[in-house]
Image (cartoon, helix red, strand yellow):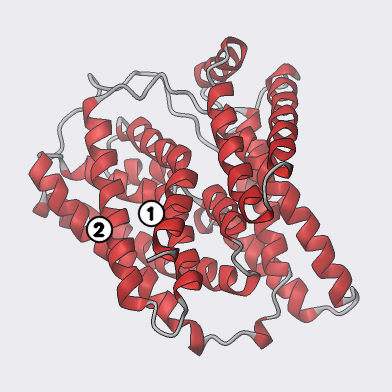
Amino acid sequence: MAVMLLARKWRWIDRVSPMAVLYVIGLLVANLTSWIGEGNLLALNNTIGNVCIPLAIPLMLISCSLSHWSTGKALKAFLSGLLSVLIVILAGFFLFRGQYDTHQFAQVSAVAVGIYTGGIPNMGAIAQGVGMDQETYLYVTSYDLIVTGLYLVFVICFGKPVFRKLLPAPTSIQAEMQKTPAPLPSEKQSGRLGELGIPLALTLLIAAISYFISTLLPDNLSTPILILILTTLSIGASFLPFVRKINRRAEQENQQAKSFTLGLYFVYLFCFTIANACDVRQMDLIGSLNILWYILFIIFGSLLLQILFSRLLKLDSDSTMVTSVALINSPPFVPLVAALLNNKELIILGITIGLLGYMLGNYLGLGIFYLLANS
């Protein structure tokens, strides 16, 4: 919470991302301190990690509003970006698995689907769902931070001229999108207790129901089913009239829903515990380079494929660029790209696509895992 509050005061934290800052802090704590016993620290991290994701998924999904998602352009842009990511991830699985066994690299592919279709919440949820060990998870997330950082530098420095040279000139999407201002994640929240109390109560209920059902299943199925039930019940809860009323009120005030912000707290706490559980001195960085090449292939390969699909679908350059950033870098970076393009109408499009990917990410990631693990 402190890092997110500081991000409002120090803009560089927002640009770097609070998640990256928390990773660094977690790694420093894990590698420079010895005042907590290794066993106790690992047990504490596992406990926190097991609680954070089941709470974060409902809190963030409940705040999603589907009222802006009935546009042809948004659907075409989303599908072109989604197919690009999935095709490249599947191709890269066979190219880069190298010394990894099929099951382990299928875990990497599943988590990659979560990252590049939804974002951090999906990544953590899928990692738990497929049983990925913490060391591999840290490789994936660390290399992801490096490569997506490079990609964002490319977008900021060269994206506008490159995209506009390869694709048709942008056209107005204002007529296709509703005019409700897009919520920004760092804006202040109003003080009405019900805006957090009701979603929080629903979250606890959804988590309890999901956990109870998962306990009735075999151990190898309990975690994936838990994640899928959490996702499904949370999407359903977002349609409840009193929940939609809370979300509409937040949109009208140009604010992010409180439940979404609280969900981010749990996600960032999860990221911190993962980093805090890893001693980098024991990591085989050379042995994990295939994961780095795989992530590079996914990000820049999917970009090229998405540009090809956009040409076939006659999508304009700005819509394609914001779609790519929404999927690869996640929705919080959408306003930055919209400002870069001097096209604020793209904010709603980008956030819509990012949230669509977030809703589908858990299903797709777990589906890809079971497909590849048995290949």
Mark 2 residue element: helix
The front one of 283 and 96 is 96
Q: Is residue 227 left or right of residue 358?
A: right
Name the quadrant of the C terminus.
Answer: bottom left
- 175 relative to 30, above or below: above
Residue under the image location 77 percent in, 61 percent down: 46
Q: Are marks 1 and 2 in contact (CB under 8 Å)?
A: yes
Q: Position of residue 254 (x, y in %)?
A: 51, 24
Count of marks placed on residues: 2
Q: Position of residue 348 (x, y in %)?
A: 37, 30
Residue on which the image places disc 1: 328
Q: Quadrant of residue 135?
A: bottom right
Amino acid type, callout 1: Ile
The front one of 289 and 152 is 289
Residue on which the image places disc 2: 303
Amino acid type, callout 2: Leu
Whole-Å distance between the Cαs marked 1 and 2?
9 Å
Residue under the image location 75 percent in, 34 percent down: 208
- 142 relative to 168, above or below: below
Mark 1 residue element: helix
Residue under the image location 71 percent in, 48 percent down: 52
Mark 2 Cα within 10 Å, few/some/many (few <14, many 20+)? many
In the rendering, which numbered label is found on residue 314?
A: none
